[in-house]
Image (spheres, grey):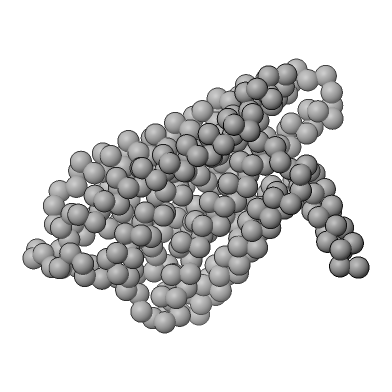
Amino acid sequence: MENINQTSDFFLLGLFPPSRIGLFFFILSFLIFLMALFGNLSMIILIFLDTHLHTPMYLLLSQLSLMDLNFISNIVPKMASDYLSGKKSISFIGCGVQSFFFITLASAEGLILASMAYDRYVAICFPLHYPIRMSKRVCVLMITGSWIMGSINSCAHTVYALHIPYCRSRTINHFFCDVPAMLTLACMDTWVYEYTVFVSTTLFLALPFIGITCSYGRVLLAICRMQSTEGRKKAYSTCSTHLTVVTFYYAPFVYTYLRPRSFRSPTEDKVLAVFYTILTPMLNPIIYSLRNKEVTGAMRRVIQRFCSVVM
């Protein structure tokens, strides 16, 4: 096929068909977007305002909320604008920017979730060593490392995607600029890049997931040996919360990006992408707030403090 100008616009086919059912799902997804914005922003502000939550666990949680806030904001506003205006084009540079932030946030969030699992592992299995192993310095290093490694990984993928030749068709069968979906339009064999996607997914998603699974295996053994019923109950609650978040995030991601191209379909990829780009950012603050007594207690304290100032 004939090459065209590298800086020509791309076109996103989107997620919803132009029908009543499509409109229903669009409205639903936009409501989820608003809930995610409110929930994650509330978690960030709450953790910042309440000193009881200035611990490694909640510092990591505030970063998870920040990543989710940026994650969904990187995808849904553009998708909503395309659906309402009917104009589905995105500039070459705009596509690169969206892809960069998507990969950065996806990689960094995978590492943050692994850091949170390590935090719970140390807190439950080595409580006396917790202040040393999970000091604020260690926590800051984990957070900084997650952002830096995610950015480096993203730079490599995005630079490659923006420098390969594309053919006459510029229509991406997705609702955002996902690099593997973009590469189906390439005028060259991309098997080398597909191998790097496999390696990258293994390093940033599969290995952290295995680490999380192993750490929670140790945690469950430690919980079973606990004498305190209250302590066992609290540990189960915290771990089940984190495992719920991990399952919603990692499972669709790993299933999507570790499959060979021959086993993938655009429709299935788009449906799975809804889980980690739209649903998970909305569910995380709900799961962590409604199932966490420390967070609900902090909410009451902040609301009481606010009411006392206003009154």
Q: Nearer the viewer, residue 132 or 77?
A: 132
Left or right: residue 237 compared with residue 86: right
Residue at the limit of the structure toward the bottom, as seen here: 85
Quarter placement of the N terminus? bottom left
Q: Nearer the viewer, residue 237 or 260?
A: 237
Left or right: residue 170 compared with residue 219: left
Which residue is at 75% across, 17% downward? 225
Q: How many labels, in total?
A: 0
Residue 172 image point, x, y percent: 29, 64
Residue 36 image point, x, y percent: 61, 60
Left or right: residue 240 compared with residue 302: left
Residue at the limit of the structure toward the left, as seen here: 2
Is residue 266 shown to the viewer in this render? no
Question: Image height check: is 305 above or below 114?
Answer: below
The quadrant holding residue 246 is top right
Residue 99 image point, x, y percent: 36, 56
Which residue is at 64% across, 58% downward? 41
Is residue 66 shown to the viewer in this render? yes
Q: Nearer the viewer, residue 206 or 116?
A: 116
Question: Image height check: is 231 above or below 284?
Answer: above
Question: Image height check: is 139 above or below 282?
Answer: above
